[in-house]
Image (cartoon, helix red, strand yellow):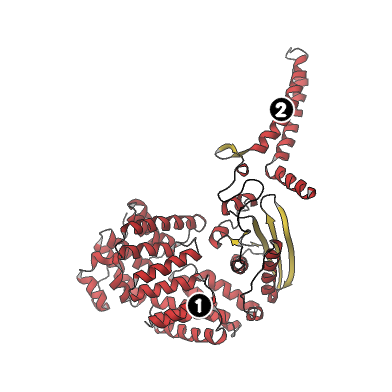
Amino acid sequence: MADKDNKSLLGQFYRRKVMRVGLAYVIVGWMMMQVGEVTFEALGLPPWALTLLIVIVCLGFPIALVLAWAYEVTPEGIIKDPSDSPLPGMQSGNSMISAAPSVAVLPFDDMSEHGDQAYFCEGIAEEILNSLCKVPGLRVASRVAAFRFSGKHADIFEIAKQLKVQTVLEGSVRQFGEHLRVTAQLIHAEDGFHLWTRQYDRQRKDLFEIQEDIANQIVDALSLTLKHNHLREQHEVAPRAYDFFLRGRHYFARHNCRDFKYAALMFSRATEADPNYGRAWAWLAYTHGVAYMYFEASASHHDEARRACEKALLLAPKLAESHIASGIIHCMEYECEQAARAFEKALEIDPRKYEAWYFFARTRIRQGNPSEALKLLQEAARVRPEDYQSVLLQAQLYVSLGDDKQAIAASREGVDKARAILEFKPDDNRALNLGATAWLRLGERELADRWMKVSLERVPDDPIVLYNAACYYAISGHREQALDCLEKCFLKAGTINPDWLKNDSDLDNIRDSGRFVRIMSGAPESLQIRGCSTID
């Protein structure tokens, strides 16, 4: 116990830079005394002046150490060391968090030769994070909150302080052909000491075992019990297929037409590399199904979505993703009750599956049931607290339900989350596109115009961006611009979901337009495209 206390005290000395300040003070003090010895006599100062200088330097040494312990130099000036004040939810004393054990999983550093494996490093960290989320009694920082520290090499104590966790898992990945070197270390943030560290030199085919072992070692170090919910089939996935799967998920998260095409290609290649990879088939079905409903209602997307879903259900019937895919396909086919049963099955398997709550809500929106959709989006926001989409869509539903007060509150919460995402992912165009309408509801017209303008400039032909722009201009009173965007969206997507057009309250200002009626009738030959301009 005494040895542990001594290590903790030494760690505090290092973290608070007491050692560094003490060494710097000794060097500067010695230089001052050398200068005094040479110059005081030449300046005609009395002999006791040098003695006084030595006494002042010596007396100042302990004072400098005390100040270094108590205060910290920051860009905002000298402040009291934040560790001397308990964080919200912290106990006084040495414990970081007063409640359950907690951990943040940072993206692993990419140590590959070309530095092009960021998607792979994030994927490994995310899989470990997902495993830890299933551990009873363990608080796990959200993916978005933890991943914003990627590549910043921030101080572990500061990361833990911002994420309100006791421990931080960090690591690195280096690939040499089929050989994989993964280094992981669990750090106790308060004193900076390692609770556990290990290096794995294995083949890529052993990656799932590495991820599982890291999760087990973490819960062992924190004296918890990990309840496994993974299918053993994961351990049999071909490494090349898993690599394509991680690439596909990376593109899928960007939620635009171009990246959805890349996502579909990557998931398709994953299934080619391993035809029995049920999870890849499920995500391939996601991609084609969502693309059909919101990007391009083509026969190709329709047929591929159905085929991939059937394969997922056949190969991995106990996987939540397979039933989410089924729900999306039933929604695509307007079979809303069958979709609901599929999503309910997915949630029975994994109640913390964000995609199940989110796409279930989208099904209810498509069905014209805003009250039920609102409840589902609230659950989606609960299981993924950093998500802005589920919150901003709630704001729109509150408007449809006539609750302007809650719409304003949800808009404010949503843009706060969108801004947090944009701080570390400035290329997240969906955050800008959805956030613009929320800013408009909040009366921030200049900021709203800027966000919408940037989102349109980045992807001027993306159907979802155009549809959201149409809603934005309709709300702001620019009817012709709204209809221009809606018409352009019609031609890009091939069709516009009529349920959206019927039930979306954002379009109320243009429903009496003859052009809107023609869009509703689905007569593309009558459309007169004038382009989709933006507000300056």
Above or below: residue 39 compared with residue 292: above
Numbered label tally: 2
| Residue depicted at x 35% and y 64% | 396
| Residue depicted at x 50% and y 84% | 308
Question: In x, y percent, where is residue 510?
Answer: 24, 66
Residue 196: give its label: none
| Element under disc 1 | helix
Pick whichever, 352 or 137, lies toward us.
Answer: 137
Question: In x, y percent, where is residue 206?
Answer: 70, 75
Give amino acid for label 2: Gly
- 477 sits to left or right of 47: left
2 or 1: mark nearer the eye: 1
- 153 sits to left or right of 4: left
* Residue farthest to the right, as pictured: 3
Above or below: residue 460 compared with residue 37: below
Residue 346: give its label: 1
- 140 sits to left or right of 372: right
Pick whichever, 248 or 95, lies toward us.
Answer: 95
Give amino acid for label 1: Ala
User: Residue 210: which quarter of the image?
Assistant: bottom right
What residue did someone put label 2 on?
60
| Element under disc 2 | helix
Above or below: residue 143 compared with residue 364: above
Above or below: residue 193 compared with residue 222: above
Image quarter (top left, top right, bottom left or bottom right) of the C terminus? bottom left
Pick whichever, 505 or 288, lies toward us.
Answer: 505
| Residue depicted at x 65% and y 80% | 232
User: Residue 493: which quarter of the image?
Assistant: bottom left
Instruction: Work out whether mark 2 precedes mark 1 in sequence or the reverse, and give the earlier one.
Output: 2
Residue 149 visible somewhere in the drawing: yes
User: Residue 177: which quarter of the image?
Assistant: bottom right
Question: In x, y percent, where is residue 190?
Answer: 67, 50
